[in-house]
Structures are given as C-alpha cells and as structure tokens.
Amino acid sequence: MLPRPLRFPAVIAAFALVLSGLVAAAPADDLREAQKLYAQGKLQPAMEKVDAYLKSQSREPQGRFLKGLLLTEQKKVNEAIQVFTGLTEDFPELPEPYNNLAVLYASLGNYDKAKSALELAIHTHPSYATAHENLGDIYAQLASRAYDRALQLDKTNTAAQVKLSMVKDLFVSQKAAPGSRPEPAKVAKAEPSRAEPSKAAPAKAVTAKAEPPKAEPTKAAPPKAEPPKAEPAKPSVAKANPAAPRPGAEDKAAVGEAIEAWARAWSAKDVKAYLAAYAPDFETPGSESRAEWEKQRTERIERPKSIQVTLKIQSIAVEGDTATAVFRQSYRSDTFKATGTKTLTLSRVGGKWLIRQERVDG
C-alpha cells in the first residue's frame, strides 16, 4: 500500500542528500561505505559501518536514517521505530522520518498512528507528494474497516458491500511483505521490469471499479451472502507508486527509479554504476567520443573526496520507449556546489531505462 521510506532513497541516498545542508562536514568513509553496502543488499556489513560511524557522530541524521532503514529491512520494526522517532524529535523539520514511521506503524496495523505521522510529515513539508499519497492509502484502509464494521451490524447494507468491494480492489494486487527492500535501492543491480516497476506500492496491476448491483424496486431482496473481507494492504517502505496505477504510471515509476539510481551511484562515487545508466547511443554534450567523455566523467567523479546529488523530479513524460524527465538538481562536493534544472531523455533498452540525452537548463 504505502511506498517505502525515501530511499538511500527515498531511497537512503535521496534522504541523505536532502540532509546534506545540515551536516557541516562531508560524510565519513564509514558512512559512504555503508551506503554502498546498502545499495548492494549487504545489510549486516552496512550496519557495522553505520555503527562505527555513529560512535563518533551519534546525532548525525544521515547515519541514523540509514540505520533505521537497515533495521526495517532486517524486520526489527520496534528498533526502527525508535530510530525514526528519535530523528523526528531531533529534526522535526524533516518529513522523511515521519513518513518512515507511518510505514512501520501501518505494517503493524496501527493505522491511527500511521495517519498522525503522515499528517506531521505534510505539516513540515506541504508539497511532499509521497506523504499525501500514503495518507490517501491510510484513509482507504480506515474506510475498509468502517465498511466492514457496518456490514457486521447490517448484512443487508448493499451500499456498504459495494464500497467495501471497491476498496478491496485498490489493494488486491499488493502482496509484498512489510519491510521488504525498496526496489529503487536495488536498481544498481537490476532494473525493475515493466510489469513490476517496484516491490510493494513500489508494483501493482490496474483494477476495475466494481459496478453497483442494479436492483429492481419491486423485487429487490437483500443479499444474504457474507460480504467479502478486505485484505489489509501490506505497507511498502520507499518511493511513491499509486495503489491503483493510472495508465503509464508503471513506466513513469520505473523512469523515476532509474534516475534516482543514477543519482545514488553518482553520490556514492560508483563510476561503473553511474556510466551504466547511459545508453549505448548516448549523445555526448561536446564533440568528444564516448570513450573520451567516460574518461572525463570518471576523473570528475573520482577527484572530489565526497559528492552528494539531490534531485527533485518535476515531471516525467513517457511515449512508447522514450521518456523525458525534468528535475531540479543540487550538486555538492567538498570543493564545489551548484543547483540547476536538468532535462534527461531516456530510452527503454532491454527492459531498462537508460539516459540518451542530458541537458542542463540553468
């Protein structure tokens, strides 16, 4: 039901980049290594690096957020809740920890607490689309409970039966277990397929709306059959995908995840993964050859001690096997920082979305 917490990323990387302005010094080697290990799915080694980092930086938000996600993936829900609760207390202006708390509370079936956490996320960041969508999913869950209760009290209530069926349809395709890894965190290893762009609210199928039964005024008899029970949707912990995707939503989600994976690789100084995000027919910005361009990009990535890239996607348009994405990009290293608007044109190549053109708009 719910997208996974912003992944380093959201989905850890993305959150770390949001916090970059709060951290005076560049992330320590242990934290950078932990981010790489997380992206590779090596949870225990990543946790060891995070713990080592937090020994000297116990209040630093990036490391604490990463630890919260690692605990979530290890299904240590109560410990993860403690970490994210601490972040909301120390950094109440940040929306992402509230969103992650909501996902964890929802995984425990505590939708009232999940609702409160999401409302706080929206209060701190009114344009936080992920929290708005998650809150809509929470309201749908609360509605299903209310309709189910109405039918327990009055089994002849046909209107409640129809509404319950429609709410159930919203979540019928969601089978991912709570705390499973957000797909965007795995993009460096394998891009999601078209049919399943992400794992929890990160992969869904389009569902048809239930049509109300047509009853004849003089003959209608109240149905006696037991109404269907709405199966609670399993929360997912990272980037926002619709509960019932609109046409093209799966492709847009996959494009967004590909762009985030590219930014994570750049921030982690993972040159191989960064260059792999570009299509074989990528149009280099100058007259240089692909080999010359790759050499130049490798030098620019390896030269700084640290790099952090924050993205705020403004729009994604998909036409067949071509997509165009516009976003605000903030780049920060130990020697340089810049912010501007960038446009990427991507092509679907072998089931993956790869960058074909790259343009900085200013």
Image: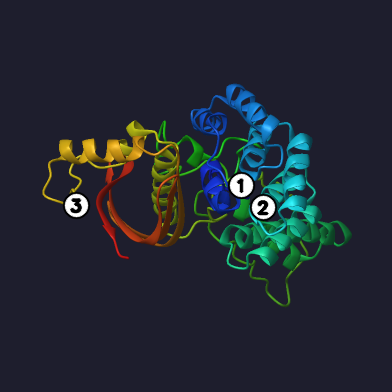
Q: Which residue is mark 3?
A: 285
Give the secondary structure at mark 3: loop
User: Which residue sits at x=30%, y=36%?
Assistant: 276
Counting from the top left corner in percent of width and height, residue 257 is at 44, 47
Identify which amino acid the numbered label 3 is placed on: Pro
**Quadrant the C terminus occupies:** bottom left
In 3D space, how far apart are the residues under numbered discs 2 and 1 (Cα atoms)? 6 Å
Identify which amino acid the numbered label 2 is placed on: Asn
92 and 134: which is toward the camera = 92
Mark 2 or mark 3, which is nearer the start of the sequence? 2
Crowding at label 1, few (<14), some or many (≥20) Cα neighbours within 10 Å?
A: many
Q: Which residue is mark 1?
A: 5
Q: On the rendered structure, is 60 left or right of 27?
A: right
User: Which residue sits at x=52%, y=43%?
Assistant: 13
Mark 1 or mark 2, which is nearer the start of the sequence? 1
Identify which amino acid the numbered label 1 is placed on: Pro
User: Which residue sits at x=62%, y=68%?
Assistant: 126
Q: Residue furthest front?
A: 335
Crowding at label 2, few (<14), some or many (≥20) Cα neighbours within 10 Å?
A: many
Q: Which residue is mark 2?
A: 99
53 and 244: which is toward the camera = 53
In 3D space, how far apart are the residues under numbered discs 1 and 3 (Cα atoms)? 35 Å
Give the secondary structure at mark 2: helix
Q: On the rendered structure, is 16 left or right of 307?
A: right
The residue mark sitting in front, 1 or 3, is 3
Q: Contact, CB < 8 Å: mark 2 with mark 1?
A: yes
Counting from the top left corner in percent of width and height, residue 53 is at 63, 31
